């Protein structure tokens, strides 16, 4: 059943793979009586509960990886922003209009960087990768808000790029987890 495999993957993002398979099987048995709304709500409740437990059980590791991950993301963001501003200023000095191609390529590179940061987080905190990604996002948001309010200018805060950044980071961590689970299945099956 396709929904069983999807649920097992979602659960394995927060639980050990063998435990995720067992919980998925239990939920599928109950779903025959209770329905699929109950099934999916149980899957998501279990994942959220496990992520919260990861915060409680691995507080220091999650905070450490979150802080370093946030620094990795934000320092590159600031360096790229400064580079773009300098590049645009140099182009204006030469009376050349900045090309959208450069900004597009830079945007693609930044998207790749966010996904790679998600990989990095998943490698550093394999037992609490999603909690560490959330920690990275929260620390980034706190830093962004502190920076915004310390400037005393209260500029309009466009949150879409930051939400996109955090979503790509979490996708990177999920992708790393998926690759790890596939590798473990290959080892278990002797391939």
Image (cartoon, grey):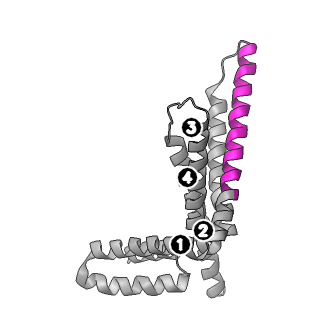
Report how far apart the C-alphas of labels 1 and 2 lie in the structure: 8 Å
Which SS class for mark 4? helix
The residue lying toward the viewer, choosing from 73 and 90, is: 73
Q: Is residue 2 visible?
A: no
Q: Viewer-nearest of labels 3 and 2?
A: 3
The residue under the point 60% across, 64% down is: 132
Sequence-first disc among 2 and 4: 2
Magenta-tinted stretch = 68-95
Q: Viewer-nearest of labels 3 and 4?
A: 3
Query: Secondary structure of the magenta portion, mostly?
Result: helix
Residue under circle 3? Answer: 149
Q: Viewer-nearest of labels 4 and 1?
A: 4
Q: Viewer-nearest of labels 3 and 1?
A: 3
Residue under circle 1? Answer: 13
Q: In which quarter of the view is residue 59 placed?
A: bottom right
Q: Viewer-nearest of labels 1 and 2?
A: 2
Sequence-first disc among 1 and 2: 1
Sequence-first disc among 3 and 1: 1
Q: In which quarter of the view is residue 82 placed?
A: top right
Which quarter of the figure is the N terminus placed in?
bottom left
Give percent across and percent down for residue 170.
Answer: 56, 59
Sequence-first disc among 4 and 1: 1
Q: In which quarter of the view is residue 64 placed?
A: bottom right
Q: Specify few, some or many for label 2: CA neighbours under 10 Å numbering under 14, 14-19, or 20 or more.
A: many
Report how far apart the C-alphas of labels 3 and 4 lie in the structure: 21 Å
Sequence-first disc among 3 and 4: 3
Question: Badges 3 and 2: C-beta atoms under 8 Å apart?
Answer: no
Residue under circle 2? Answer: 129
In the rendered view, does 118 fall on the left or right side of 6? right
């Amino acid at each position: 059943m396709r929904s069983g495999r999807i649920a097992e993957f979602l659960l394995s993002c927060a639980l050990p793979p063998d435990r995720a398979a067992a919980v998925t099987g239990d939920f599928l048995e109950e779903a025959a009586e209770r329905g699929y709304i109950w099934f999916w709500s149980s899957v998501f409740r279990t994942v959220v509960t496990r992520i919260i437990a990861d915060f409680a059980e691995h507080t220091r590791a999650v905070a450490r990886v979150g802080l370093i991950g946030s620094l990795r993301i934000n320092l590159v963001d600031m360096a790229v922003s400064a580079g773009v501003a300098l590049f645009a200023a140099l182009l204006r000095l030469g009376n050349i209009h900045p090309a959208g191609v450069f900004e597009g390529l830079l945007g693609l590179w930044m998207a790749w960087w966010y996904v790679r940061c998600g990989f990095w987080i998943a490698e550093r905190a394999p037992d609490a990768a999603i909690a560490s990604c959330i920690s990275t996002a929260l620390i980034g948001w706190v830093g962004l808000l502190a920076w915004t309010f310390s400037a005393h200018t209260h500029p309009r805060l466009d949150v879409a790029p930051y939400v996109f950044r955090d979503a790509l980071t979490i996708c990177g961590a999920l992708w790393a987890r998926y690759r790890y689970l596939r590798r473990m299945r290959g080892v278990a099956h002797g391939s």
